[in-house]
Image (cartoon, helix red, strand yellow):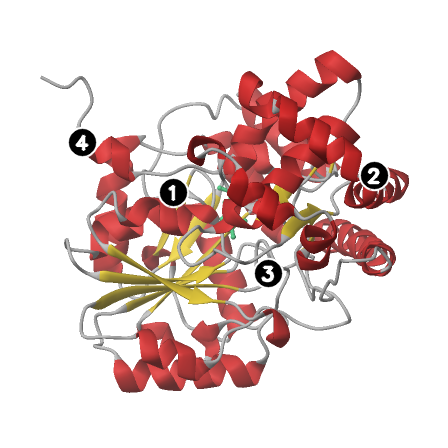
Amino acid sequence: MNLFAERNTRIDTENAFKVGPHIVHVEQKKGAVIKLNLGEPDFAVPEHIKGEIKRQLDLDNTHYCDPKGLLSLRKAISNQINETRGLKTNPEKIVVFPGGKPSIGLSQQVYCEPGDEVIYPSPGFPIYESFIRYVRALPVPLHLEESANFTFSPEELANLITPKTKLIYINFPSNPTGGVAGQALLEETARVILERSHPNVRIYSDEIYENIIFDGHQHRSISSVPAMSENTIIASGFSKTFAWTGGRIGYAVFPTVEEADVFKTLNINYFSCVPPYNQEAAREALENPLSKQAVKKMVETFEARRNLIWQQINDIPGITCQKPGGAFYLFPNISGVCENLDLIEKHDRLPIEQQSSPANLFQMFALYEHQVAVMDRNSFGQIGADGKHFLRLSIAAEQSVLEKGVLRLKEASEDLSGLDKFLNERPDLISS
Ligand SMILES: Cc1ncc(COP(=O)(O)O)c(C=O)c1O
């Protein structure tokens, strides 16, 4: 008899949480690491939100509450969604979750039968791909094109939709690329979906970076395209906009009350409810005019860093980088570095059990020998990622730290002898 059920072999993970122990190991041995791997804003939660959490605790708002989410918060979300997307949703179609993440996997449980196909962006947030096989559905990556600033072509999407398609994830602004979709792409995508798919196919539009957009642009949601609100789930949350990743508050707006209530049942089964004092503070975040100022300041800082670091990273021989339109990541192509360091050959010559990808080797080499932490391409979806050599750099760090990190990446990209030493020793395998 096996200890673990077989399905546990079919779930993946989020490498962002796995790289931590490697960083600790390097810091214990060598000293501080420059961390450009972080998927959370390096800002404090705005004071008025913190104040509301404290106030709610003092009111003893610390008990079980509505598993669907507090009505006060769902009303505030509903108002905000209707205002920004031009919709007419209502609080009954909204469910609050502990973060933006849970509704990703729960949607696969709710909508997919074994054998159904799930389309998702690649590179993309790893949890889309991670869950698909767990529910015995079939992963169908929709590759984001570097040449189109990490968007996809509606024709490509059309080719992937089959009678088995059940769920389609899109994510703009995107993690890990920072890509943003324009109105034309959203409209074309909507047209393809409406033409090609059954009305019961759901579009999961992950809009968690909706407020982190540069160059004076506004966030656009596919749910605003006529008829799309009838099949789109809008998912968003408070982790990125309010630098509040530890608050664990996210939400989804469903096309129907019936669907929202199925998710409510899952909430009851899994975790009962989200802490009410945080939910009231999330309501405050949406309703207090001070939030706009705090978010604006954060976004302006990200934009200034993006401009600077994008330039500096493009100055490194062997690296080219698209200019992200939102979120707080850069996604440089390091094919030239892989070539200069002969990394593809060196990777292929490794014993099979030590192979990962050339970009992963570079990630580990940069961490262990040059003390700079970034993420590799394969951390954002593995299917069809062979031969794609990219890194994700987070700009959620002070400018001076970012500049130092880029300098270390440059040094790593030229350090042939250091790479050979690293490959001989593979300290990352010993410590993992
Ligand atoms: C695209 C995307 N969706 C969802 C999440 C999950 O957010 P949360 O921390 O609120 O669960 C993240 C976090 O990195 C993300 O990048």
Instruction: Check if mark 3's residue and mark 4's residue have beta carbons within 8 Å.
Output: no
Q: CA distance from mark 3 to mark 1?
A: 18 Å
Mark 1 touches mark 4? (CB < 8 Å) = no
Going by the numbered disc 4, the residue's amino acid type is Glu
The label shown at residue 408 is: 2
Does label 3 or label 2 sit earlier along the sequence? 3
Report the Cα–Cα distance between label 1 and label 2. Answer: 36 Å
Q: Amino acid at mark 2?
A: Arg
Q: What residue is shown with label 1? A: 102
Q: At 66% from the left edge and 72% from the top edge, which residue is drawn?
A: 218
- Measure how far apart labels 3 and 4 are at the Cα level: 37 Å
Q: Is residue 331 visible?
A: no
Q: CA distance from mark 2 to mark 4?
A: 42 Å
| Mark 3, residue position | 210
Does 395 sit left or right of 114 as displayed? Answer: right
Q: Which residue is mark 4?
A: 6
> Upstream in the sequence, badge 3 or badge 4?
4
Ligand 1 is within 8 Å of the C-beta of the residue at disc 1: yes
- Depth check, front residue: 123 or 74: 123
The label nearer to you, 3 versus 4, is 4
Name the element at disc 2. Answer: helix
Q: Nearer the viewer, residue 112 or 9?
A: 9
User: Where residue 395 appears, x then y in whole percent?
Assistant: 75, 47
Could you classify mark 3 by the number of other residues whose Cα lies within 10 Å: few (under 14), some (14-19), or many (20 or more)?
Answer: many
